[in-house]
Image: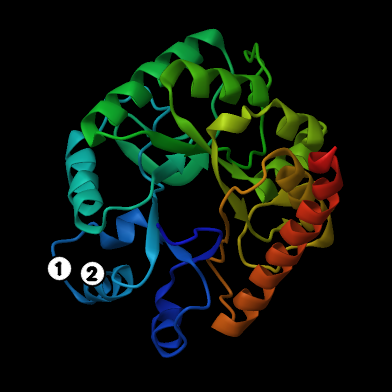
Amino acid sequence: MSPRVDFGLGLRPDHYEEIAANPGKVSWFEVLSENYMVPGGNPLQWLDTFRRDYQMAMHGVSLSIGSIDPLDLRYLDELKVLVNRIEPMWVSDHLCFTGLRGVNMHDLLPLPYTEEALDHVTERVMRVQDHLGRRLVLENVSSYVTYAASELTEWDFIAALAQRADCELLLDVNNVYVSAFNHEFDARAFLRAMPAARVRQFHLAGHLHKGTHIIDTHDHPIIPDVWELYAEAVRLFPSVPTMIERDANIPPYAELLAELDMAREIAARVAQERAPEAAE
């Protein structure tokens, strides 16, 4: 029987030693693909060590699936080498573009939600999946601007893409919350529009509230409103693996484990609430 994959953390160098000294606290880790797309060195040695004991998922930031630039085949080849090395449960990246005309802006830039963009991204996703020999998992991003040209809502665009490209979704609950505040839409309507069979993973993270807008920073604890939205996501999509991202102001490993315990408690409470319904 395969080991249970439920609650995990992002694997960060700050915690390598603590993880090694305190095994078994999580069931899986998510690794940032680009950090390990190298021919050797200490990071890969650590990754090989942890891979023997934990399931892994790969998460990238450089695919730029929505760009009009040609797909970076060298990047895809290097990504596939890492996929073959660690055999992850799934490979994810962001539904966005990160640059134009060969310039990487090192940001996750939102797409215009048009039929033309949907056709374009669908074709690119299918090419990437053919190259990797597996489904791609795509994450909704936090955004701060919208396009006048958009014809679809973000959630309708994502749902249509998952169906047309036969890909899967990484549902970032914090990103839904951030974008819903910034653009004044109903976060729960976004969740309800996601095709349940396509939701492969949840992300949870913290953010910076600036009063008039929210910035997705991944450097704060998860706030109560995001926990509430996570509970709604678990009601809609039970048994989806959950992980917490922290990319700056990284706390001790024990603090992230405590946050992960909160996710476990919420998921268990939702499961108890659903039990009488399932028995009817």
The extreme left residue here reads 39
Secondary structure at numbered mark 2: helix
Image quarter for residue 57? bottom left
| Front-lying residue, 186 or 280 | 280
Question: Which residue is located at x 62 percent, y 58 percent?
Answer: 217
Answer above or below: position of 207 versus 220: above
Question: Does residue 148 appear left or right of residue 140 in this picture?
Answer: right
Answer above or below: position of 264 versus 62: below
| Front-lying residue, 97 or 256 | 256
| Front-lying residue, 114 or 279 | 279
Return the x and y of residue 224 as percentages of the image width and height.
83, 61
Mark 2: amino acid: Leu
Question: Which residue is located at x 81 percent, y 46 percent?
Answer: 274
Question: Does residue 71 appear left or right of residue 183 in this picture?
Answer: left
Question: Which residue is located at x 49 percent, y 9 percent?
Answer: 116
Q: Which residue is mark 2?
A: 44
Answer above or below: position of 173 versus 120: below
Return the x and y of residue 187 as percentages of the image width and height.
78, 37
Question: Which residue is located at x 20 percent, y 57 percent?
Answer: 85
Q: Which residue is mark 1?
A: 40
